Image (cartoon, grey):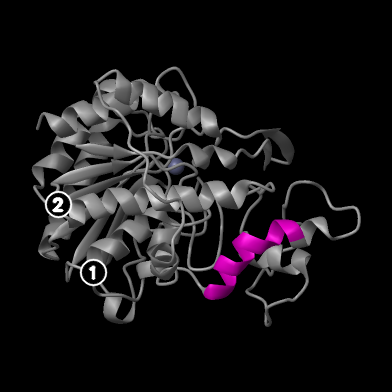
């Protein structure tokens, strides 16, 4: 299997985010890539960098899942923010259009509130360079699979599955998983996404909610009690042409591997009825019991049967890294998953 990472991803290194009203050190930083790559190295895997971190073709593909004004916002907001009187180095919202808002603002503060649905997406001057390189990594892994490889892995960080058509949230800016599905769609009429991150993939769901060509399924800690709070219920099943092409399985907080794998089996069964010919796995590792964002109770060894089950589906598959935050288990959790995926 070929695996991808680009050092430029480390340009996005937010120092802190707001948690329960406190500014705390962000768990979503370059250290994650170090820990994850150490886990891969323990199995003998090496990481390849994509030849380019940005290209007109990547931009065109991103424009199929994100709005033009959102893409322009991500690229330009830091410089426009810095031009404001007394602006902090970090871009962060202080006003939100609760209830939706009636018009799109021109002012940078209004645009930050429009495009960031929470306080977990601070941007520095170098953030966009890291975020676009991150998308290029997902694109490169997907092109491997599009060119005939049975599977490939993208070490994406920051994660992407909370990023919707024009909103950042939950550490996510560009939706790498949705980008992978978009590239696969160039060759496959029906593509499926299985999201096994601890959190509901609300951004991915939003992007494909009214589409019948990309099936989305997510198992996650019940959003009644957990981030992202406002999406992820079992009653969200798609709309229009996408009716019936979205499946959420919320799990009670603290659920263990037994419940997790039973939910996965339901997701796989529903996905197979859609008859996809290619798959994107949104691989969060934050369902581990020791994760700093803890909500479920998987052990390291539980990621091996998860990898085995996903490999056994037998579809061309892009594995996109989503969540999983620094602990002494993080690298081992990825190694356990990849061992299972490669020994199914
Ligand atoms: Zn997560």
Residues rendered magenta in the picture: 68-79
- In the image, what residue occupies the spot 35% across and 76% down? 210
Taking 117 as reference, is 14 above or below it? above
Question: Was residue 77 drawn as part of the magenta stretch in this picture?
Answer: yes
Q: Earlier in the sequence, mark 2 or mark 1?
A: 1
Q: Which quadrant, please, contains the C terminus? A: top left
- Residue most extreme to the front: 51
Q: Which residue is mark 1?
A: 186
**Residue 250 appears anywhere in the view:** no
Give the alpha-carbon distance from disc 2 to disc 1, as whole Å: 14 Å
Whether disc 2's CB lies below 8 Å from ligand 1 is answered no
**C-beta proximity under 8 Å, tags 2 and 1:** no
Asked whether, in this view, residue 256 is left or right of residue 32, the answer is left
- Residue at image coords 20%, 35%: 307
Numbered marks: total? 2
The secondary element bearing badge 1 is classed as loop
Q: Position of residue 165 (x, y in %)?
A: 48, 68
Whole-percent x, y for residue 284 in the image: 37, 40
Q: Which residue is under mark 2?
A: 316
Q: Is mark 1 within 8 Å of ligand 1?
A: no
Magenta-drawn stretch contains 225: no
Q: Is residue 191 above or below residue 14?
A: below
Q: For residue 184, what is the image quadrant?
A: bottom left
Question: Magenta stretch: dominant SS?
Answer: helix
When asked about the image quadrant of residue 306, the answer is top left
Element at label 2: loop
Question: In this rendering, would 228 be left or right of 254?
Answer: right
Camera-side residue of 299 and 49: 49
**Of residues 291 and 186, which is closer to you in this image?**
186
């Amino acid at each position: 299997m070929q695996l991808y990472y680009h050092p430029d991803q480390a340009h996005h290194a937010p120092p802190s985010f707001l948690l329960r009203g406190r500014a705390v050190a962000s768990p979503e930083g370059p250290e994650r890539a170090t820990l994850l790559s150490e886990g891969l190295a323990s199995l003998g895997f090496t990481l390849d960098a994509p030849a380019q971190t940005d290209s007109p073709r990547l931009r065109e593909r991103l424009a199929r899942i994100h709005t033009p004004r959102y893409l322009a916002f991500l690229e330009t907001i830091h410089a426009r923010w810095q031009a404001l009187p007394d602006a902090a180095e970090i871009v962060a919202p202080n006003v939100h259009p609760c209830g939706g808002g009636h018009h799109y603002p021109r002012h940078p503060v209004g645009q930050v509130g429009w495009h960031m649905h929470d306080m977990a997406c601070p941007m520095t001057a170098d953030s966009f360079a890291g975020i676009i390189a991150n998308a290029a990594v997902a694109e490169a892994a997907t092109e491997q699979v599009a060119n005939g490889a049975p599977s490939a892995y993208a070490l994406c960080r920051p994660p992407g599955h909370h990023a919707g058509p024009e909103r950042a949230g939950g550490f996510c800016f560009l939706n790498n998983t949705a980008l992978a599905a978009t590239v696969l769609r160039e060759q496959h009429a029906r593509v499926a996404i299985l999201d096994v991150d601890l959190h509901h993939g609300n951004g991915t769901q939003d992007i494909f909610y009214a589409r019948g060509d990309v099936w989305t399924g997510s198992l996650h800690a019940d959003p009644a009690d957990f981030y992202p709070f406002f999406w992820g219920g079992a009653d969200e099943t798609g709309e229009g042409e996408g009716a019936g092409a979205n499946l959420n399985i919320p799990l009670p907080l603290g659920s263990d591997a037994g419940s997790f794998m039973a939910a996965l089996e339901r997701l796989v069964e529903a996905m197979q009825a859609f008859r996809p010919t290619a798959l994107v796995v949104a691989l969060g590792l934050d369902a581990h019991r020791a994760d700093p964002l803890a909500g479920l109770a998987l052990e390291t060894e539980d990621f091996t049967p998860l990898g085995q089950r996903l490999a056994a589906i037998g579809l061309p598959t892009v594995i996109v890294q989503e969540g999983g935050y620094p602990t002494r288990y993080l690298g081992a959790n990825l190694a356990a998953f990849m061992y299972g995926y490669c020994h199914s």
